[in-house]
């Protein structure tokens, strides 16, 4: 009787394995609305990646690495696989077999972010080297970078490129334009508003040069404040942190005489003052959204302040993001890029991304993509229970169980035959 029950149980187990194996081997994610195609294996997030696939993937990997989470191999493979033959990156390549459009289809920001992420996780030296080579070849005469190759230099793209150089131990001050010999710092300092600007705009950075003169741009300032310190998206803030306030831009100094350190302090002072005047956060600069909080911009500003050691100035904006009034967690829910920004801001400012106003941002970020290879902190045990991302561990676990079930049935049937004999 016991033998019959055991055979039946193992038979059921085998049947379940037969049904489970295809599920474990299944690939991809549900298609975003209107796309008509399933999202690729390894990609973070479920929204259409057409405009931000590489960017959000890079941010997610950087944030995980910053908090000692080892990303899934499939996630790193996907990002590396997005690289174009010449070393650049597009925003997203649905079909990587098709060649990239070198003039319009590749972006400085995407390339720089991907280089930083691949350098951080390690094991992708060739891809990183190719990406740096692409950035150097596409540097503008003024020392900066535009969004696309040949485009006018802007603060955001130039700052992203500086971050990529710094992340690969390349001194940005030594990367010069072949035509003029100018550096990325020359391009950035030329975009900073000086003492001829309004008092409340001094130290800010413009996005690009304009005919009517530079216009203060908060997002450009947050990016440039990091870059002129030679920092990338994940600055080294260990051991930094003081009550010292940022130093306002010293009047009398021209952009030509100003040092990158002075420029960074002036930008930090502008960010701290601006956020304090708006309830400890930045406002959206998008048309029609003047009075709306800019959660991502505020997170970037916190990172920039922390990079300079100004944690006291960063503390109130961080507290605002964590508060119910700020509702940053609701803004970031399910969005890997947004979650990554909050993780990086909290990490840089000395906070705990695993207790962000009572919310574990790291766990939420991990849940938007494939299961990490290894996780630290309280989310580690929870991650072990999640469905595998298809890298192979979950598949072979299923196969192993099925093999044991099959062997068990064989042994029991063999035993029954012996009893009959």
Image (tube, rainbow, N blue to C red):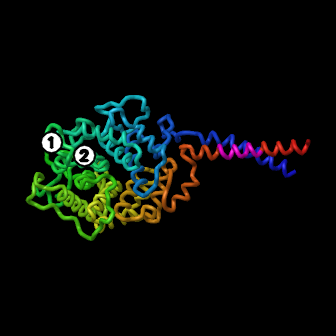
Q: Quick one: label 1, few (<14), some, or many (20+) residues within 10 Å?
A: few
Which residue occupies the foreground of this view, 362 or 417? Answer: 417
The residue depicted at 25 percent of the width and 60 percent of the height is: 271
Q: Is residue 46 visible?
A: no
Instruction: Between label 1 and label 2, give the one nearer the viewer.
Output: 1
Q: Which residue is mark 2?
A: 158
Q: In the picture provided, is 27 more to the left or to the right than 109? A: right
- Going 55% across and 39% down the picture, which residue do you hit? 27
Q: Is residue 95 above or below residue 394?
A: above
* Residue 206 at x, y percent in the picture: 20, 50
Residue 402 forms part of the magenta stretch = yes
Magenta residue span: 399-408
Please identify the quadrant where the C terminus is shown: top right
Disc 2 element: helix
Residue 395 seen in the figure: yes
Q: Residues within 10 Å of mark 2 (few under 14, many from 20)?
A: many
| Residue 313: numbered disc | none
Image spot of residue 222 (x, y percent): 27, 55
Q: Which residue is mark 1?
A: 181
Instruction: Give residue 302's position: percent from left, percent from top.
Output: 31, 60
């Amino acid at each position: 009787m016991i033998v019959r029950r055991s055979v039946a149980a193992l038979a059921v187990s085998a049947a379940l394995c037969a049904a489970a194996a295809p599920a474990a081997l299944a690939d991809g994610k549900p298609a975003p609305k209107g796309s008509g195609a399933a999202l690729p294996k390894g990609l973070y997030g479920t929204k259409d990646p057409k405009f931000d696939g590489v960017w959000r993937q890079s941010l997610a990997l950087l944030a995980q690495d910053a908090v000692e989470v080892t990303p899934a191999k499939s996630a790193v493979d996907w990002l590396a696989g997005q690289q174009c033959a010449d070393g650049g990156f597009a925003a997203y390549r649905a079909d990587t077999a098709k060649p990239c459009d070198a003039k319009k289809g590749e972006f400085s920001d995407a390339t720089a972010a991907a280089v930083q992420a691949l350098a951080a996780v390690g094991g992708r030296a060739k891809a990183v080297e190719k990406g740096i080579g692409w950035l150097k070849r596409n540097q503008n005469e003024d020392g900066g970078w535009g969004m696309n190759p040949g485009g006018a230099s802007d603060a955001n793209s130039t700052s992203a490129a500086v971050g990529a150089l710094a992340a690969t131990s390349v001194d940005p001050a030594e990367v010069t334009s072949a035509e003029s010999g100018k550096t990325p710092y020359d391009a950035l300092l030329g975009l900073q508003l000086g003492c001829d600007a309004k008092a409340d705009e001094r130290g800010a950075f413009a996005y690009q040069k304009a005919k009517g003169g530079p216009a203060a741009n908060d997002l450009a300032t947050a990016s440039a404040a990091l870059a002129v310190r030679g920092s990338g998206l994940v600055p080294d803030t260990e051991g930094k942190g003081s009550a010292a306030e940022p130093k306002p831009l010293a009047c009398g100094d021209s952009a030509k005489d100003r040092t990158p350190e002075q420029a960074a302090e002036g930008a930090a002072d502008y960010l701290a003052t601006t956020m304090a005047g708006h309830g400890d956060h930045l406002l959206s600069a998008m048309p029609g959204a003047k009075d709306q909080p800019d959660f991502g911009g505020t997170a970037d500003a916190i990172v920039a302040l922390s990079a300079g050691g100004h944690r006291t100035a960063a503390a109130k904006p961080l507290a605002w993001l964590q508060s119910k009034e700020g509702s940053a967690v609701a803004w970031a829910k399910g969005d890997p890029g947004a979650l990554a920004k909050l993780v990086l801001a909290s990490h840089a400012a000395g906070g705990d991304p695993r207790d962000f106003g009572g919310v574990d941002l790291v766990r939420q970020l991990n849940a938007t993509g494939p299961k990490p290879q290894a996780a630290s902190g309280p989310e580690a045990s929870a991650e072990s229970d999640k469905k595998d991302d298809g890298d192979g561990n979950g598949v072979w676990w299923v196969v192993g169980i099925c093999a044991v079930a099959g062997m068990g049935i064989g042994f029991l049937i063999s035993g029954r035959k012996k009893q009959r004999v």
